[in-house]
Amino acid sequence: MIELLSGSNDVIWINPFGPINGPILPNIYEAKESLTVYHPGMNFLAMPSLMLLNEKRRLLQVVIYLIGRDFEPDLVFMDDPLARCFAVHYGKRGALTLYYAGETDKEDYPGAERNQLAEAVDLVYKPGKLHAEITEEDFIAALYKRLEEISRLIDAKKAEVVV
């Protein structure tokens, strides 16, 4: 879906985890002209009690990276319930914030984390469930439908702000 978004937008995808065999230190690569992928590196402090510290470190690394690129986002799109500090930081700077609340969030994160992020963002998008046995064509069509729904949410929010 991020690739589809980058078709007519300059997108920097902050992938908090990267691949299993991903780098320990921050890694940046250009997937295509309008899509840059940035891995902030792995959390060195993997203890649950230090989760907030890890998230603030990740935010600081991303902010420094974006300052170096002279890039100020208009929209911050999050699918990680632990990214609340991103919503707060960029929301204060005037960026529209959207939480993509996928089905896996319910399994992987406590309700409190999801609820706190939902309260911190401007918009919450809950996608419909896709069938397990879906064709590639239907999958792509479903992604486009989700992007259209997200676009309508964003347009409605922008219209609400203007009024």
Image: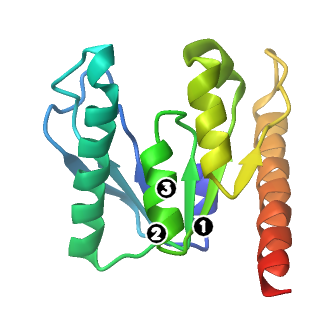
- What distance separates the C-alpha of mark 3 from that of mark 2? 26 Å
- What distance separates the C-alpha of mark 3 from that of mark 1? 27 Å
User: Mark 3 or mark 2: which comes first in sequence?
Assistant: 2
Q: Which residue is mark 2?
A: 34
Label 2 CA crowd tier, 10 Å (few <14, some 14–19, many 20+): some
User: Can you give x and y, in whole percent of width and height, for residue 70 in the image?
Assistant: 29, 80
Is disc 2 in contact with disc 1, using a CB cutoff of under 8 Å?
yes
- What distance separates the C-alpha of mark 2 from that of mark 1? 7 Å
Badge 1 marks a residue whose secondary structure is: loop
Q: Please identify, in this view, whether the residue under mark 3 or under mark 2 is nearer the observer.
A: 3
Label 1 CA crowd tier, 10 Å (few <14, some 14–19, many 20+): few
- Looking at the rendered structure, the kind of residue marked 3 is Val
Q: Is residue 41 left or right of residue 123?
A: left
Vertical position of residue 10 compared to residue 26: above or below = below
Q: Quadrant of residue 149?
A: bottom right
- Looking at the rendered structure, the kind of residue marked 2 is Ser
Q: Which residue is mark 3?
A: 88
Q: Is residue 34 left or right of residue 133?
A: left
Q: Nearer the viewer, residue 144 or 124?
A: 124
- What's the residue at 80%, 48% (across, down)? 146
Give the colouring mode of the picture: rainbow
User: Can you give x and y, in whole percent of width and height, for residue 130 in the image?
Assistant: 82, 26
Quadrant position of the C terminus in the picture: bottom right
User: Can you give x and y, in whole percent of width and height, for residue 147 in the image?
Assistant: 76, 55
The label number, if any, that marks residue 62 in the structure image: none
Q: Which residue is mark 1?
A: 7
User: Can you give x and y, in whole percent of width and height, for residue 129 in the image?
Assistant: 83, 26
User: Mark 2 or mark 1: which comes first in sequence?
Assistant: 1
User: Mark 3 or mark 1: which comes first in sequence?
Assistant: 1
Vertical position of residue 42 compared to residue 133: above or below = below
- Looking at the rendered structure, the kind of residue marked 1 is Gly
- How many numbered badges does the structure rendering display? 3
